[in-house]
Image (cartoon, helix red, strand yellow):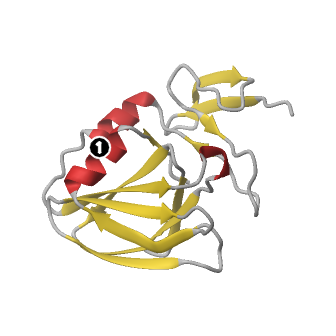
Amino acid sequence: MDYEWLGVQFDDADQVIFYEFNDDAHGCLSNGICHMQWLYAEPPVDPVMTAPTALDEQAKQYKVEPGQCAVYLYLESTRPKWASMPVNIVVDGQPYGTTNHATYLFIVHPEGELRLQAYQYEKHKHDKGLKCSSGKQYYLRAREGLFTEIEGGLESVPTDMGAPEVQKRRLALPN
């Protein structure tokens, strides 16, 4: 199978500010955006695109301001990397993004109730409510079993467990 892709970045005025061609299925562009495709996926899924390196670093070092919280979501899988399926995340009823075993999603949300859903298959959505407290960071993990899709939806993990997991992953671009 021949993989070729073109990364194009636009500014707020819809002017092209970056473009680069890549012909590697898992290749990264010079700005740090990577195209991550799966060997198999049933049902077929879109690839996860990682954010530029600068945005990844900003998210990892984000200082939460009063009136908001920061949420980091990642997938922990016991499957081999080639068989791990991505997880789709819905925030407050709106599709937000997709993450996999090598990426994480980052959300800044106003203080108050945050409604999340995680799923690999549309008919098996897992709900999670989170009281978003001002100035707080939260780490949520979806766990994928060896023979099952995500187990139990999203679960909160302590910072000392979640932060190291986020540090070794790349930020996935939201939808």
Residue placed under numbered mark 1 in the picture: 164
Q: Tell me residue 44's x, y (percent).
A: 76, 58
Q: Tell me residue 58's x, y (percent).
A: 31, 37
Q: Tell me residue 172's x, y (percent).
A: 49, 45
- Picture quadrant where residue 147 is located: bottom right
- Picture quadrant where residue 121 is located: bottom right
Viewer-proximal residue among 24 and 64: 24
Give the left or right position of residue 21, taking residue 129 as reference.
right
Is residue 59 at all visible to an observer of this figure? no
Give the left or right position of residue 85, taking residue 141 as reference.
right
Task: Say which amino acid is labelled 1.
Answer: Pro
Q: Across the whole image, how many numbered discs are drawn on residues?
A: 1
158 shown above or below 22: below
**Label 1 element class:** helix
114 shown above or below 4: below
68 shown above or below 17: below
Q: In which quadrant will I find the N terminus?
A: top right
Q: Tell me residue 54's x, y (percent).
A: 38, 29
Give the left or right position of residue 111, taking residue 11 as reference.
left
Q: How crowded is mark 1: few (under 14 residues within 10 Å), some or many (20 or more)?
A: few
